[in-house]
Image (cartoon, grey):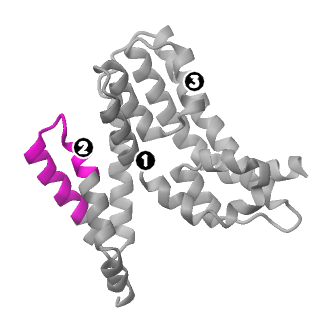
Amino acid sequence: MKRRAFKVALPYTIPVLMGYLFLGIAFGVLLGSKGYHVGWALLMSVVIYAGSMQFVAINLLVSPFNLIHALIVTLLVQARHLFYGLSMLDKFKISEILKPYMIFALTDETYSLLCSVEPPEGVNKKWFMFFISLLNHSYWVLGSVIGNLAGTIFEFDPTGIDFAMTALFIVIFVEQWEQNRQHTPALLGLGVTLVSLLIFGTENFMVFAMMGIFIALSLLQSRLKEGEGTR
């Protein structure tokens, strides 16, 4: 039963493999350039497993320790997972003992797959969902380790590698813009971010921008839904 679920789940995760390997390698190289060896790359990818937050965590590691700032940044950067988790409560009921791991491993890409694909008849859904999550997790760990080792063995200038996650979010933003007729959330996000940047500067704007976007979208949620319904 488990073997069949694994074989069926594997093809669905191949696109994620390609993306996670690239981003994981970028993370591993960048982490290594800051003086952290492969053990750190492995530990962070296994225990934290949060792509964007792991890139942010590198700066937190090399900056003066500020617990409150780290907590706020982590909460705001990963706040979207609160909504992911709420929407998956019913689906995860069947996971039983696997449920804690399923919650932990719920990344953007895994969430997308779990919401959009269903196992064929005769395949256990619990194990199907578990292997999708586990495979995606393993891809990220593999990429991180490869990147860190490669950065250690081969000397090269890592300048610009930290832009990989920014580039990914730009691509996601453009795709979402093209696929949705409702552009108010995107424009709102850009506006709040620009105002935060002008007021708080490049070093401190991110926390305030994320907080402002979260509050604004929460307050306008019902109005945005009404706008979608009238189109």
Mark 2, residue position: 206
Quadrant assignment, res 52:
top left
Question: Is the residue under label 1 in contact with that under label 2 (CB below 8 Å)?
Answer: no
Quadrant assignment, res 72:
top left
Q: Closer to the camera, 107 or 148? A: 107
Q: Closer to the camera, 37 or 25? A: 37
- The residue at 78%/54% (across/down) is 96
Q: Which residues fall within the magenta stretch? A: 188-210
Q: Which SS type dominates the magenta stretch?
A: helix
Q: Disc 2 versus disc 1: distance between alpha carbons?
A: 13 Å
Mark 3, residue position: 43
Q: Earlier in the sequence, mark 3 or mark 2?
A: 3
- The residue at 49%/40% (across/down) is 50
- Tell me the amino acid under the disc marked 2: Met
Quadrant assignment, res 149:
top right
Q: Disc 3 versus disc 2: distance between alpha carbons?
A: 26 Å
Question: Is the residue under label 3 in contact with that under label 1 (CB below 8 Å)?
Answer: no
Q: Is residue 164 above or below residue 218?
A: above
Q: Residue furthest left?
A: 198
